[in-house]
Image: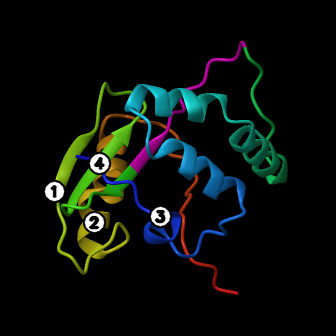
Amino acid sequence: MHVLVGLQDINPSIDPQSDLAQLLKEAIPLKPADRADLLYESKALETAHSAAAAEGDTSAPTADEKVDLHFVCFVKSEEGNLWEMDGRRKGPLKRGTLSADEDVLSQKALDLGVRSFLKRESEAGGGDLRFSLVALSPSFD
């Protein structure tokens, strides 16, 4: 049973008037396929992505260029499981269990997650291991 919680219960640092807050409010009650559609069609995400991409110093590849890039995300569930979500796979992979005081940037999580992923990619001949890192966190300002 899913319980709809208030946005401030999810993350009190999110401005309730922001695009992210609105997206979360819309996404939380949806089933996975509907949630995916919402994210795919989100103008707010498209705008944020375009703005972030414009700040980089690498030009975007053309639509017909072959690229071997994909999305990988590590998430800690409410039950303490560390999940790897890799855009090349059919579903999430459980990478281990974290204690209540460990988050996805703890040493254990980094060993089970990011470091393990980079090692596997390197050993598989992954070539150029370029990546970017995105985190939702409080501001340090």
**Label 4 secondary element:** loop
Q: CA distance from mark 4 to mark 1?
A: 24 Å
Of pointers 1 and 3, the one earlier in the residue sequence: 3
* Residue type (three-letter) at the residue carrying disc 3: Gly
Q: With respect to residue 6, does 40 lie above or below?
A: above
Q: Could you say which quadrant of the image residue 81 lies in?
A: bottom left
Residue 1, position as x, y percentages in the image:
22, 46
Residue 104, position as x, y percentages in the image:
35, 66
Task: Examine the rendering and report whether any part of residue 2 can be seen.
Answer: yes
* Residue type (three-letter) at the residue carrying disc 2: Ala
Which labelled disc corresponds to residue 109?
A: 2
Which labelled disc corresponds to residue 80?
A: none
Of pointers 3 and 2, the one earlier in the residue sequence: 3
Q: CA distance from mark 3 to mark 2?
A: 28 Å
Of pointers 4 and 1, the one earlier in the residue sequence: 4
Q: CA distance from mark 2 to mark 4?
A: 27 Å
Question: In the shown orientation, is residue 52 left or right of residue 137?
Answer: right
* Tag 2–tag 1 contact (CB < 8 Å): yes
Q: CA distance from mark 2 to mark 1?
A: 8 Å
Q: Determine which residue is flagged by label 3.
A: 6
* Magenta highlight range: 64-73
Q: Looking at the image, is mark 1 or mark 3 nearer the viewer?
A: 3
Residue 116, position as x, y percentages in the image:
28, 53
Q: Indicate yes or no whether the magenta region holds residue 47.
A: no
Q: CA distance from mark 1 to mark 3?
A: 29 Å
Q: Determine which residue is flagged by label 4.
A: 2
Is the residue marked by circle 3 packed among few (<14), some (14-19), or many (20+) residues within 10 Å? few
Is the residue marked by circle 2 packed among few (<14), some (14-19), or many (20+) residues within 10 Å? many
Q: Determine which residue is flagged by label 1.
A: 96
